[in-house]
Image (cartoon, grey):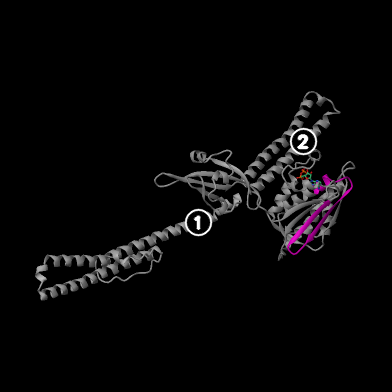
Amino acid sequence: MKSKLPFTSSILFKAILLHLLLFAGLFTLNTQAYIGQHDSFIRFCAFYILSLILIVWFTMRITIGLNQISDQINEFTDKKYTVRKQIPGNTEINRLYDKVVDLGEKSEHAQERLESSSTRLNGILTYMTDGVIATDRRGKIVLANAAALEYLNVKEKDILSRKIIDALDIEADYTFRDLLESEPEIIIDCENIMGEFTTLRINFALFRRQSGFISGVVAVLHDVTEQEKNERERRLFVSNVSHELRTPLTSIKSYLEALDDGVLQDPDIAPSFIKVSLNETDRMIRMILDLVTLSRMDSDTIILEKEVINLIAFLHYQLNRFDQIVGNSDANEKQFKIVRKIPLQPIWMEIDTDRLGQVIDNLMNNAIKYSPDGGNVTVSLEQTNTQVLLRITDEGMGIPKKDIPKIFDRFYRVDKARSRNQGGSGLGLAIVRDIVKMHDGFVWAKSDGETGTTFTVVLPYAPLETDNDDEASSWGSQTSEKSSLIS
Ligand code: ADP
């Protein structure tokens, strides 16, 4: 701030005035000496002028020095730390100037430190995935980082100065005083900037000055949507497992009790009771094995043992097993026909044959299980430059559209009674999805809900440079392998 001083307030003016007063005083005291003494009066005047010149010169130097210091302070105030002024001489004014420059340099360093820590803090707050909101001591928001704005789906200008309990929509349960006193951890649900419903865990902490005086509250918003979902799924999973195991166990227990009560002696009923118990036991074993597979996949303890194979030969090998079942089945069992639409040229791929065999097995079993007697199951394979598409289509009851998104969930069954009758665990498709995912592929189902369902497994494909004749021969060619397996 540069305001010009009036001349009457300047040191120069005051020095001249003082000098004049001094000489006026001297003159008044010695008036007699100068009256009629022409020479003395001239000398007096000469002294006056000479001393006035010296006073003016000296005061001017001080004033120039002080003005330079004042200008230098202005430069520092304007953050121009490199500009330096020239002050003639080597007096107290120069020392004062040096002190001012020293102070300026210190303030420059302090300013730099402050700016860099504020930039660092801003950077941290901006790129933090957690939301941060700070308030003043009255609970009005003074800071909200980008994540907090995204979570709460608000603009900065709309949230600043708003009360925090209003912005977080917790007025019904908390006052600002509650936040100060108990620093609670709360969970809220809100809609984020993408329109998704998120669950936020909010922790509050008091914000104190060095003096201990509370100057506000800091709230940290953490997105726990995934965690909450996992927790819900885990609870549901545990309850499903207990329910699924309780049903066959109860049934086995009641059959065993009946046998114990004397049915064992009845040759007409006893065998059927024992058979039902065995079937239920088999179903439980199957379910437990499926659960073990899923749990190993969840905990990443399954490592794929991939090998290069000819997918065409591998698929024929898997389907031949089902053809064999049809061939060996008695008249009471469901009949079905497998229609193969599989290209002739080999497709070399790196897969875990055991796991992918399980995928084909589960899908084929479902196609047969949920199909009428005498239905066709069509298996087709298609290869593009980047993908291999395996489709298994049946002519069964289909899957209602509303159920399609859920059938890959654990224990989800469209028709629970029918699935149980068929010995299903509701885990087969969950295993299929996980195995396909482990191969970097994906699977989906398509059905009109009335007749037939198509499951499509898509696996990534890249042509392999293979000269691996050993592995090629292990899966053989379509015709030779088929005949060897059937014979
Ligand atoms: P499940 O052991 O009950 O067959 P899955 O996980 O294999 O369990 O299948 C889940 C549910 O999806 C089944 O209970 C059934 O309702 C439905 N489903 C699966 N495949 C078919 C299909 N090919 N046709 C009709 N419904 C099917």
Front-most of residues 16 and 125: 16
Task: Return the x and y of residue 35 as percentages of the image width and height.
Answer: 11, 71
* Quarter of the rendered structure image containing ligand 1: top right
Task: Return the x and y of residue 481 as percentages of the image width and height.
Answer: 81, 57
Task: Return the x and y of residue 277 as percentages of the image width and height.
Answer: 78, 33
Give the number of the disc on residue 122: 1
Q: Mark 2 points at which residue?
A: 280
The kind of secondary structure element at disc 1 is helix
CA neighbours of label 2 inside 10 A, class few (<14), some (14 to 19), many (20+): many
Give the Cα distance between marks 1 and 2: 63 Å
| Quarter location, residue 410 | top right
Front-most of residues 473 and 112: 112
At 80% across and 32% down in the image, what residue appears? 274
Give the number of the disc on residue 72: none
Q: Give the range drawn in magenta.
A: 364-393
Q: Is residue 171 placed above or below 7 in the rendered structure?
A: above
Q: Nearer the viewer, mark 1 or mark 2?
A: 1
Res. 335 in view: yes
